[in-house]
Amino acid sequence: MRATQFHTGLLVLWLSVGLVAHEGHVHHSILGVVQSVTKTLIVITATDGTRTTIALNEKTKFLRGTRTVAASELRAGERVAVGVATAKEPYVAVEVRLAASLPGGPKLRP
């Protein structure tokens, strides 16, 4: 149990590091689990139960670890960190960071 909490904490920290605000890019990050996803929208639920709808567009980047991946890799149930340009709704995703596999953790598709 403690190892799982530790790895979860490390994952959140790792995902957050890549979302540091700088001009013209990500200024706010939303962490959670994907509830649903379409070509133009993603709905995520935070640990407090808050659901957030975020628009996706042709400029949205999808990353797993440090590599760019196709939007089709995003699945319901996956933990993500979504970088948005503003801290106010309506949100538009600048980047979506999918979790990379952790040492000793489940292996995600390459």
Image (cartoon, grey):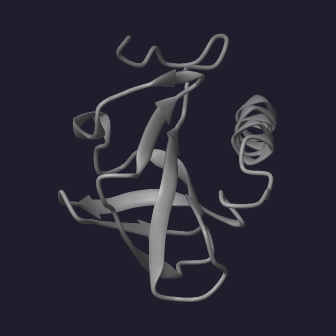
Q: Is residue 104 left or right of residue 52?
A: right
> Residue lying farthest front?
24
Q: Is residue 4 above or below residue 65?
A: below
Task: Give the quarter of the image for residue 29.
Answer: bottom right
- Reply above or below: 73 against 86: above
Number of numbered tags placed on the structure image: 0
Q: Position of residue 53 (x, y in %)?
A: 39, 77
In the figure, is residue 71 to the left or right of 67? left
Tell me what residue is drawn at x 29 percent, y 53 percent: 58
User: From the viewer's perspective, is 68 left or right of 77?
Assistant: right
On the rendered image, what quadrant is the N terminus found in?
Answer: top right
Q: Nearer the viewer, residue 57 or 32?
A: 57
Name the outermost residue toward the bottom. Answer: 89
Between 5 and 67, the one lying in front of the other is 67
Left or right: 68 in relation to 58: right
User: At x 44% / y 43%, what residue is drawn?
Assistant: 61
Residue 46 locus on image (x, y percent): 56, 69
Quarter of the image with the C terminus is top left
Residue displayed at 36% across by 49% down: 77
Which quarter of the picture shows residue 9? top right
Where is residue 83 drawn, in percent x and y?
59, 58
User: Eyeballing the image, is 98 above or below 45?
Assistant: above
Whole-percent x, y for residue 4 in the image? 70, 34
Residue at left offset 79%, top offset 35%: 10
Vertical comparison of 75 with 69: above or below: below
- Give the camera-side residue of 109 and 64: 64
